[in-house]
Amino acid sequence: MPNPLARARYLTSVHQLRQLPPDAGREVAFAGRSNAGKSSALNALAGQGGLARVSKTPGRTQALNYFALGEGRCLVDLPGYGYAKVPEAMREAWGRVIDGYFRQRRSLVGLVVVMDVRHPLRDYDRQMLDYAAARGLPAHCLLTKADKLGRGEQAKVLAAVRRELGDAASAQLFSAETKLGVPEARDVLLRWLELEPAGDAAPVAPDSPR
């Protein structure tokens, strides 16, 4: 079945809140620590290798990058956070923009938090989840680079993360390299965006196994 996310095309980059596109339609934001694999996850979900630029330099995303899907739907790639080499003034500026984005953006319908499965739920990840909770938005965590762990360790980490999250967010294993979890994550996005589902997978509940 066709993947509606494959229609994603770069729309604009936002450095200041006044540059945001009209606040209409539905959009899902992607957040994650620098080098957690956020760009690779976006590319895998869209089935496009070059949609979001994958950089060898962590923290390279310095704007809110919008990707339009048509029909008023967008994916939003938020700046990578937590990278020490980013100047303090720049981190503060990003913080103000992201804070304002979460507070003001009515078309935001969900948040995907991308975490390296080997280093989940760091302080910055929790801050992003707090933003979603404050707005009453659903949040879904992608435990990326799952191919770096054996199956037993994958299961342990996933169970621990789900226990800690409780009802605050759902979580799943994900690998852009092996495509583990791509269909499941894609269906979460399509449900939030109210687009035709890519498959027959059931919706992900916060405490349901994936």
Image: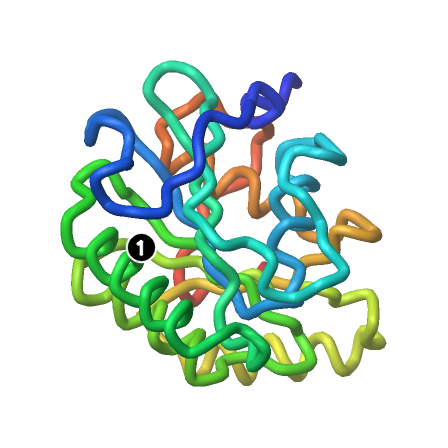
Which residue is located at x 61 percent, y 44 percent? 42
Kindly indicate the quadrant of the structure image that contains residue 99.
Answer: bottom left
**Front position in the image: 170 or 43:** 43
**Front position in the image: 193 or 1:** 193
Counting from the top left corner in percent of width and height, residue 22 is at 22, 26
Kindly indicate the quadrant of the structure image that contains residue 123.
Answer: bottom left
Q: How many marks?
A: 1
Kindly indicate the quadrant of the structure image that contains residue 33.
Answer: bottom right
93 versus 46 height, above or below: below
Q: Which residue is mark 1?
A: 138
Name the side, left or right, on which 173 lies relative to 109. Answer: right
Name the side, left or right, on which 193 lies relative to 160. Answer: left
Counting from the top left corner in percent of width and height, residue 40 is at 69, 49
Which residue is located at x 81 percent, y 76 percent? 149
Which residue is located at x 27 percent, y 42 percent? 108
Q: What residue type is disc 1 on?
A: Pro
Tell me the crowding category of disc 1: few under 14, some 14 to 19, or many 20 or more residues within 10 angstroms, Cα based: some
Counting from the top left corner in percent of width and height, residue 210 is at 59, 59
Which residue is located at x 71 percent, y 63 percent? 57
Name the side, left or right, on which 31 lies relative to 43. Answer: left
Quarter of the figure that contains the N terminus: top right
Counting from the top left corner in percent of width and height, residue 28 is at 38, 42
Colouring scheme, one of rainbow, by chain, secondary structure, one colour: rainbow
> Element at badge 1?
loop
